[in-house]
Image (tube, rainbow, N blue to C red):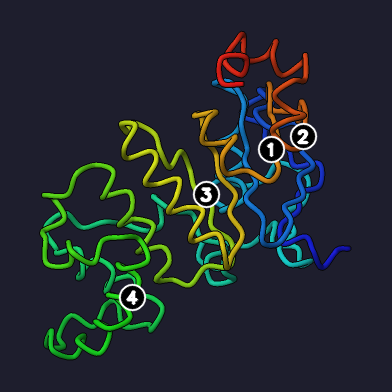
């Protein structure tokens, strides 16, 4: 059974000068699933993400990835293991083309990111793989477009492509549809479903219709603790969750 769990936290806790932001969170993310972490503002979702990706040190508790304790590891070590946080690690450069941005992600994996003295022609060997990734996120027709000219939703798709360039085993998506219009939300939902076919996704998301459409399992946080967990059909009817959201889940159900 443990082989089915790619990521686990045991009594994960984070305190800030006496304030407990994350309070004994036990989380198990199944391999190959889409797992959503939700909760009202201030519930501790982003802090959990920062703990998992080591941007914050853990006060107490453990983080296990593929059964190995990674609690004391640094962000770069966690990323090299295959756990990559999209929209933070995957930088997008506005004045490079869409293709060039993905190529930067591929360079990182090859270890040639800082070989600035080499001519651009040496990167052409990465173009075929870069185009495959752009096709995967429906951006092939934008390959030669300067990134600054992309619509907001397309930039989010590009950020996912640059993350995929690192070949992650587990993708952590932090608010992937935030600030998007209805059309862009639909496109990104389908994109997440597509890229999740061969990997595990853990995401923080406020849009409950997105959660309902995508998630296999939902963990609800409130005041830093796990309030409820299960499939959407169960969680959305939980009285404790309805109370915590003050109608948000009711409206989405």
Q: Which mark is residue 229?
A: 2
Query: Which residue is labeled 1 in the image?
Result: 218
Residue at horizontal 61 percent and vertical 46 percent from the top: 51
Residue 65 figure quarter: bottom right
Instruction: Report, in whole angstroms, how far the alpha carbon at label 4 lies from the one at label 1.
Output: 31 Å
> Is 59 left, or right, of 95 in this rendering?
right
Earlier sequence position, callout 2 versus callout 4? 4
Residue at horizontal 39 percent and vertical 47 percent from the top: 188
Image height check: is 192 above or below 177?
Answer: below
Earlier sequence position, callout 2 versus callout 3? 3
Query: Which residue is labeled 4 in the image?
Result: 132
Q: Nearer the viewer, mark 2 or mark 3?
A: 2
Q: Nearer the viewer, mark 1 or mark 3?
A: 1
Q: Position of residue 149 (x, y in %)?
A: 11, 49
Q: Position of residue 143 (x, y in %)?
A: 17, 67
Instruction: Report, in whole angstroms, how far the alpha carbon at label 2 lies from the one at label 3.
Output: 25 Å
Q: Position of residue 1 (x, y in %)?
A: 88, 63
Query: Which residue is labeled 3 in the image?
Result: 55
Q: Position of residue 139 (x, y in %)?
A: 26, 61
């Amino acid at each position: 059974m443990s082989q089915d769990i790619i990521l686990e936290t045991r009594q994960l806790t984070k305190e800030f000068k006496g304030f407990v932001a994350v309070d004994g969170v036990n989380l198990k993310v199944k391999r190959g699933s889409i797992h959503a972490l939700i909760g009202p503002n201030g519930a501790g979702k982003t802090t959990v993400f920062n703990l998992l990706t080591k941007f914050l040190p853990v006060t107490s508790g453990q983080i296990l990835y593929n059964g190995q304790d990674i609690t004391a590891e640094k962000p770069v070590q966690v990323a090299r293991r295959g756990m990559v946080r999209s929209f933070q690690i995957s930088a997008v450069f506005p004045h490079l083309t869409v293709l060039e941005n993905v190529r930067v992600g591929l360079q990182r994996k090859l270890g040639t990111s800082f070989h600035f003295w080499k001519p651009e022609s040496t990167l052409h060997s990465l173009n075929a793989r870069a185009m495959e990734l752009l096709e995967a996120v429906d951006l092939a027709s934008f390959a030669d477009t300067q990134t600054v000219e992309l619509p907001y939703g397309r930039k989010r798709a590009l950020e996912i492509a640059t993350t995929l360039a690192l070949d992650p085993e587990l993708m952590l998506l932090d608010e992937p549809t935030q600030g998007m219009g209805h059309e862009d939300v639909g496109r990104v939902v389908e994109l997440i479903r597509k890229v999740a076919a061969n990997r595990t996704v853990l995401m923080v998301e406020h849009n409950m219709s997105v959660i309902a459409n995508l998630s296999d399992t939902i963990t609800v946080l409130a005041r830093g603790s796990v309030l409820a967990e299960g499939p959407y059909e169960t969680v959305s009817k939980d009285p404790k969750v309805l109370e915590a959201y003050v109608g948000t889940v009711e409206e989405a159900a």
